[in-house]
Every structure is written in structure tokens, then in C-alpha cells.
Amino acid sequence: MITSRLSFSKFTSTVFLGGLLASTPVVASMGNIATTYGLLPQDIATAQSFSLFSEQVSASYYNPASLALSERGELTFGFLQATPSLEVTSNGGANPPQRNGTVLESNQTETVLFGMKTNLTSLTKFKTPVYLALMAGVEKYGLEMLAFESNTSQEGQFMQYGQKPLFLSISAAANVMPGFHLGGGVRVTLHAKANMVLESDLAGNTNSEELDVSAEPVFIPLLGAYMDLGEIICDKKSPCLWQGLDIALSYRGESDTQTKVNATATIPGTIPNPGLPLVVNTLDAYQPTIVSLGARYQLTPSWQVATTLEYQNWAELENKLKDDTIKDQAGLSFKDAFVPRIGARYEYAPLTHLLMGLSYEESVLENGLSQDVNLFDNDRFILGLGVTHEYTDTHFLAFPLRIDAAYQYHHLAERDFILSSDEVATSPYESVTASGNAHVVSLSFSMMF
């Protein structure tokens, strides 16, 4: 059951799951867990620089083709907690709002993750193995699936951070020729609709209510390719320049979470039939179309390095927000982004690896003025560290167990913004400097068979 609360300036949605009501209101953002932080510890530790080459189940989202790199099946459980501290410092103005300290947002992202990979060869007549993988993430450690808030704000609000709604991707991959893999799949998001008809008096007492709520899945394409240039180009009898170099390419389609509410209210003697229509259409958890190109190189038997360049088509969000009844007046303008990522992997021992990564994400928000919505977005430097260890014999499991752990730090560079609202007599009414940081920890357990 979905419950909703509607006002002229703010729309908040929460979900009942198993009879438990998640916290309300919730804070959410124009982002999702996979792009803001990363899915599994390897993605988080390497700042997603190794994600295009990952053999783990998170490849079902980042690059489905990489699922064919390993013949082993996998069952993974993971946990992620992100703790942001997003700060706003007032630079003065005509009528600045009262704030309790400089920290504007500190709501945690708390996600439980589940992944599964299996070989479908026994179910088909194909000679080439086909691998299928599923990756899912649920907020509030499994209690909240549709976490988002869309609103205007006189104090300002950050664009990328907050709780994340349900994450779900399903992909398959196969080896097309020696050294060349292809994969494809879908990411699933939800578009919810609510239609409400009611009759009320001036005191707010209602009767003859009708409410219809529905949610439909939307399937977003995921495509990937993986090439081992050494295997494709080089003669196996003698080494060559391309030995140890892998290239990967992936495409992830545009996605978002949407909610549309149509309400009609009649007040006998004041508002006759067909009633007063109230329509709210809003989106959240937006992900632009992303095209990624990456290279991984085996420097030595112990060292691997990887780099990835992502193109993110954020400019399309401007057209999306024209139909958003909450943010349409803000005049938000976005620019496309190129995100560089670099990382390294070191084999400390045969079954133990250390990982590290760095990325830089330039703000996609064109200017610092957005009427009523007052959105903040900063340049971000992201640093990750992690470790992975495989136990071949745990004495209580029939299959090997891999444990991965990671830490990630986000630094938000200072940026000035101007706050404005048509609800304030003098507008713009304040100039502020936004900055902050975020700490992310992640742990996963994978049984391989």
C-alpha cells in the first residue's frame, strides 16, 4: 500500500512493506546508488574505475558482457551505508532563513543488496555458455522501496545525496569469440500513478472518497562489450604489445522514478462538480544516459590498473523537468558531463587483493540560481579504498566464500548559490556557500559455485 501526502509546495511518498511504515518524510535526490556511490565494495573501493571489468554480479548493471569472464556462479549479500554531511554557510542577504547550524542535510543512505549469477547452459541447446545475473538494492536495510521527496525549499537542497529507491537490474552475457564478450539487460524502475476523487466541506471533513493507486515497471536498456586484446590480436606462441590489455564499452539508458497524482475535490455550495482538479507530476532518482569506455592493463603479475571515461547526458533533464509541476518554475539548466575514473588492484596474497580508486565529477548544474527549488550541486572528488579475501574452505559452507569491504570518501568543493522564492517579499533573499563531505562503508559476502 502506498500512502501519499500532498501540498502545493511539496510531495512526499512512503511505502508500507510487510506492515511496517518507513520513516516519513524521506530525503531523496536526483541520483541512484549505483552512480552516486557504487553497488558492491569493489565498485566503491575503485571509484567505479574497475566496474566495467568486474566479474561480480554488479556487472549486470555496469557492463553485462563482463559476466562471461568467469564460469563460476555467485550468490551475494551486501550492505552499504553512506553518511553525508552537507553544509551551507550564509553570506548574508535581504532576508536569510534561520538555520540550526551549518549542516543542512545528514540523512543516511542505508541499503541492503542482493545479487545472483548462474550459468544457463544446461537449460539451452547453445554450445556457448550463457550467464544470467540479477542485482537488487533496497533502502533502509530492506524496509523502504519507493523512497523519494520532491519539493521546493527556502533553505536550499542538495541534488545528489539522500535516500535511494529500489534498484533492480537483470542481464545476460555470452562469449561471442575468443577474447570477445557481449551482454545486455534491463534496469527496472517504477512509475506510480494515483487518482483520487473526494467530496469535502469547508472544515475539511470528507466523504465519498475514491482512491486508485498503481505502479508500472519501466525497463531501461543496458548493453556492454568486453575485449581481451591480447587474446584477440596476439599470437599465443609469443608475447606482444597488446598482451594484458582489456577494453570495455557500456551503454546505460536514461531512467527515473516518477509519480503522478490526479486529485479532484468538490465542496457543495462552493466548488460544484466536476470539482477542483489538482495535478502533481514529479520525478526523482534520475539517471542520464551514460556511455562508458574503459581500459584495464596488467602491469605486473601483482598489479592491475584501470581507467574509465564516462559521458553523462544530463542536458536531457531540462526537458524532463518542464513536465514536473513542482520544479518547472525553477529554470534549471544542466550540462553534459565527462567523468574520469582511475584505480589500481594489488595482489597482496594469492587470495587477498587490495583496491583503490579516484574520480572527479564536475557539477552538472549550470548556474547557482533556481527559483523556489534552490538546488545545490558541487564538484566532487571521490577516493576509495578496499580489500577482498577469498576463503576456499570455511568448514561450514560447501563452496568458497569471498568477503569484500570498502570505504569511500566524497569531498564537495565549495560553490556559491543565490536563494530566491516568490513566497519571500524580497527575492533573491540570501547568498550562500555550499560544501560538505560524505563517508561510505560497504561490506559483502559472496558464495561462489
Image (cartoon, rainbow, N blue to C red):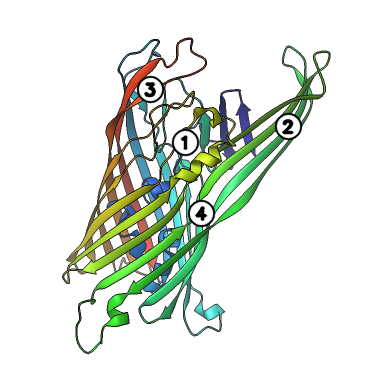
Q: Answer with the quarter of the image where residue 281 lies.
A: top right
Cα gap from disc 3 to disc 2, whole angstroms: 37 Å
Classify 10 Å Cα crowding around label 3: few (below 14), some (14-19), many (20 and above): many
Q: Which residue is mark 1?
A: 28
Residue 53 appears in the rendering: yes
Residue 396 appears in the rendering: no
* Label 1 element class: loop
In the rendered structure, the answer to whether residue 304 lies left or right of residue 254 reads: left
In the rendered image of this protein, does residue 256 appear above or below residue 185?
A: above
User: Residue pushed farthest bottom?
Assistant: 237
The kind of residue tagged 4 is Leu
**Which-is-in-front pick, marks 3 and 1?**
3
Cα gap from disc 4 to disc 1, whole angstroms: 17 Å
* Image marks 4 and 1: residues in contact by CB distance under 8 Å: no
* Image marks 3 and 1: residues in contact by CB distance under 8 Å: no
- Image mark for residue 168: 4
Residue depicted at 56% across the width and 78% down the height:
123
Cα gap from disc 3 to disc 1, whole angstroms: 22 Å
Name which of mark 3 and mark 2 comes first in the sequence. Answer: 2
Name which of mark 2 and mark 1 comes first in the sequence. Answer: 1
* Label 4 element class: strand
The kind of residue tagged 1 is Ala
Where residue 415 sits in the image (x, y, percent)?
A: 30, 30
- Image mark for residue 418: 3
Where residue 76 sits in the image (x, y, percent)?
A: 41, 59
> Which corner quadrant holds the C terminus?
bottom left
Name which of mark 4 and mark 2 comes first in the sequence. Answer: 4
Q: Which residue is mark 2?
A: 196
Residue depicted at 55% across the width and 31% down the height:
328
* Label 3 element class: strand
